């Protein structure tokens, strides 16, 4: 394999790692509905702000979400909307079993 293919696989592995946590999957689904701030997501998941910030950081570093500052809050939104296609595909397969 050449280096560019290996790098692409590393990026894909990083993406899958970022999505491999139930809380982060919940965040992705919520952000698919509407942008939300850290405080809103924290209340929804019932974790402390530092834990939520860590989850958002992982998703942001994988380019799955992005944040936009509005006043003194950062609102996160789903950047990689195509990830929802993957979930829809997976759900179809899972439901046929």
Image (cartoon, helix red, strand yellow):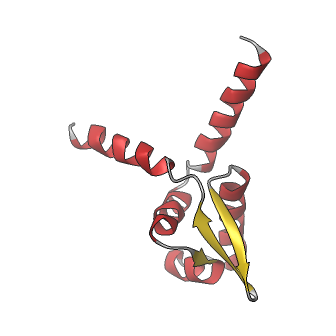
Nearer to the camera, 77 or 46: 77
Q: x%, y% of residue 97?
A: 21, 36
Q: x%, y% of residue 32?
A: 47, 64
Nearer to the camera, 63 or 53: 63
Residue lying furthest bottom in this view?
71
Q: Is residue 72 left or right of residue 19?
A: right
Please name the residue shown 67% across and 63% down the image: 66
Please name the residue shown 75% across and 13% down the image: 2
| Residue 86 drawn above or below residue 44 | above
Q: x%, y% of residue 22?
A: 50, 57
Screen quadrant of the N terminus = top right
What is the count of numbered marks? 0
| Residue 93 drawn above or below residue 48 | above
Residue lying furthest right in this view?
3
Please name the residue shown 53% across and 65% down the image: 27
Q: x%, y% of residue 50?
A: 73, 74
Q: Is residue 42 left or right of residue 94?
A: right
* Among the 4 quarters of the image, the one containing residue 39: bottom right
* Among the 4 quarters of the image, the one containing residue 56: bottom right
| Residue 83 drawn above or below residue 25 | above
Please name the residue shown 65% across and 71% down the image: 52
Residue lying furthest left in this view?
96
């Amino acid at each position: 394999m050449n280096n560019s293919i290996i790098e692409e696989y590393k990026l894909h592995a990083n993406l899958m790692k970022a999505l491999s946590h139930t809380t982060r999957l919940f965040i992705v689904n919520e952000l698919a509905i509407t942008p939300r701030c850290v405080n809103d997501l924290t209340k929804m998941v019932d974790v402390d702000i530092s834990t939520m910030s860590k989850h958002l950081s992982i998703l942001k570093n994988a380019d799955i979400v992005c944040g936009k500052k509005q006043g003194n809050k950062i609102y996160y939104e789903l950047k990689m909307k195509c990830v929802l296609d993957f979930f829809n595909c997976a759900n179809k397969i899972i439901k046929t079993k």
